[in-house]
Image (cartoon, helix red, strand yellow):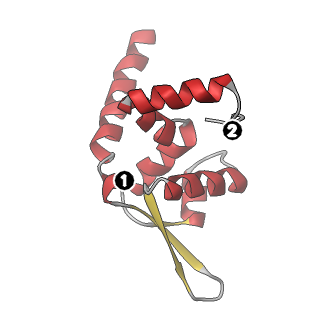
Amino acid sequence: MGKIKETSTNFENKKILADECSEVYAANIIGGQWSLVICSWLTNGKMRFGELKKSIPNITERMLTTQLRKLEEHNIITRTVYAEVPPKVIYELTDIGYELKPIILQMEQWGERHKKLKL
């Protein structure tokens, strides 16, 4: 979800809806193509920034950085920096982030079934 002016009616409506509906709250955190893909890759274990970048076609470094920061801010992932030259940074799902694994698998299965309907 893009940035919305905090003074706008749209922002207030989204905030009220997220406060009332837990599923909307969750969708606001992991919604969007990049956050979900990042979480999906991290369900397989820890990854470095470069590994994530290579695993996700067409994502820019800026977008990957933005999404990783957002997921870290929401406690979905952790970022561990090792004091090396060059710096080594590892991303990993938190406990609550790992709880997304069965949900992501169900979404993948649902998506496959839905694709077949459209053929």
**Which amino acid lies under the numbered mark 1 shown in the image of this protein?**
Gly
Which residue is at a point 71% across and 32% down the rendered structure image? 7
- Location of the C terminus (image quadrant): top left
Say which residue appears at 69% left-offset and 38% top-offset: 3
The image shows residue 55 at horizontal and vertical percentages of: 54, 54
Mark 1 residue element: helix
- The picture places residue 84, in percent across and down from the top left corner, at 59, 89
Residue 62 visible from this viewpoint: yes
Compared with 27, 113 (above or below) is above
Residue at 55%, 37% (x, y): give it: 33
Mark count: 2
Pointer 1 local density, CA inside 10 Å: few below 14, some 14–19, many at least 20: many
Residue 51 x/y as whole percent: 55, 63
> Dot 1 corresponds to which residue?
97
Q: Quick check: can you spot residue 54?
A: no
User: Label 2 sits on what residue type?
Assistant: Lys
Q: Nearer the viewer, mark 2 or mark 1?
A: 2
Q: Which residue is mark 2?
A: 3
Which secondary structure, mark 2?
loop
The one of 109 and 98 positioned closer to us in this rendering: 98
The furthest residue to the bottom: 84
Residue at the spot x=36%, y=57% of the render?
Answer: 44
Q: Which mark is residue 69?
A: none
- The crowding category of the residue bearing disc 2, from other C-alpha atoms within 10 Å (few below 14, some 14 to 19, many at least 20), is few
Locate residue 115: give its quadrant.
top left
- Marks 2 and 1, Cα distance to the nearest angstrom? 23 Å
